[in-house]
Amino acid sequence: MDKTTLILHVDSPDAPEIKTVAEILKNGGTAAIPTETVYGLAANALSAEAAAKIFVAKGRPADNPLIVHISHISQLGDIVSEIPETAVKLAESFWPGPLTIILPKQPHIPEIVTAGLDTVAVRMPSHPIAHALIEQAGIPLAAPSANRSGRPSPTSWRHCVEDLDGRVDAILCADDSDIGVESTVITLATPVPKVLRPGGITVEQLRSVLGEVEVDSAVLNELAPDAVAASPGMKYKHYAPKASVIIVDADTNAYIDFVNSKADEGAFALCFEEDVPHINIPCVVCGTAEDESTYAHALFTALRELDEKGAVTAYARKPSSDGVGLAVYNRLLRAAAFNIIKP
Ligand code: AMP
Ligand code: MG
């Protein structure tokens, strides 16, 4: 693939460059765009031909469905065939924001978007530039994360350029993604609402609105080789840097002693800011212990930084599973191919 990619920088939802990208998308093109979770790779969700370009640009397996992004609740009825009371409650509480809701699809949503499933994933992003873009395009936008398949998701426009320059029509560059991990995915197509992927909206928040909410066992456990994934994206090796990541399940002192005994070539500590003064191997920082959201914000940039620095092995602090920490732990488990040690 060798396209000319238009790289446009914007700092406000009024920027004229947004119109340029909206036109590209209306005409069936592709663009990487900022959202509050991670950068997304957008195309017209109502066009099979446009959506197919996303799979080619990313090298994404065809059985991994896309999330459809809307800017107004009135668009929902055109995408899903049923809007249960639970969906209304979730939309009122968490949209616009980092929550993706799965419901039965309308027949005209192209099969390629849902990877042949009879359900479709929908989200209304809160990022003002994403919102303005969807409004101006006037169409729902299918958008998975804007990374090459298998790579850490992009939380900066620089990551999009690294992965997609020459492969998409445009990259709309703005600030770093605020949250830093992808949206929470909840299905309402099961008898009890079920979280298929943890993200920016926590399980506790969902339970406060819906009462009973299940969490899919694949969130924290490796799928058996023959199992059918409820969320197809979760079955792939994901978010992985070139270094082999090992999660270290230990308290602060045990972690520090452990990594200090690992002074082999290419060994890095993926550690909290406050650990750095006590560690004598190279460090990449992933936030602070007392606030899971800082780990979420830093995680994907940190995974890419390990590659830039030539890390061979990275010993990662185990995040807490509270709040958005569950999403961090879910991503890190996949980056580490479920490799955890307790020193
Ligand atoms: P990404 O946007 O790259 O974070 O990927 C979208 C995620 O949403 C993937 O993990 C998909 O498996 C999941 N997803 C999208 N549509 C559906 C659906 N209809 N049913 C279950 N999971 C879905
Ligand atoms: Mg992705």
Image (cartoon, rainbow, N blue to C red):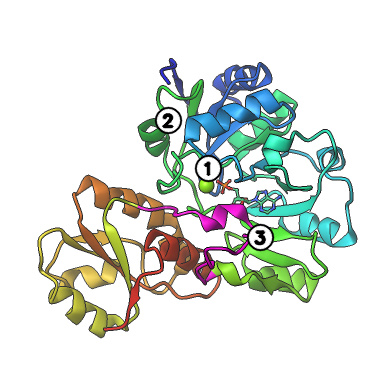
Residue 22 rendering spot, x and y as whole percentages: 64, 22
Q: Which mark is residue 305?
A: none
Q: Is residue 225 magenta?
A: yes
Eyeballing the image, is 177 above or below 316? above
141 left or right, relative to 162: right
The amino acid pointed to by label 2 is Leu
Q: Secondary structure at mark 1?
A: loop
Tag 2 residue: 164
Label 1 CB sits under 8 Å from any ligand 2 atom: yes
Q: CA distance from mark 2 to mark 1?
A: 11 Å
Quarter of the image where one finds residue 263: bottom left
Q: Is residue 95 magenta?
A: no
Q: Nearer the viewer, residue 223 or 171?
A: 223
Q: Which mark is residue 145?
A: 1
The amino acid pointed to by label 1 is Ser
Magenta residue span? 220-240
Residue shown at 28% from the left, 50% from the top? 242
Eyeballing the image, is 226 above or below 115? below
Residue shown at 25% from the left, 63% from the top? 314
Is label 2 in contact with label 1 (beta carbons under 8 Å)?
Answer: no
Q: Which mark is residue 230?
A: 3
Q: Quadrant of the N terminus?
A: top left
Q: Quadrant of the C terminus?
A: bottom left
Label 3 CB sits under 8 Å from any ligand 1 atom: yes
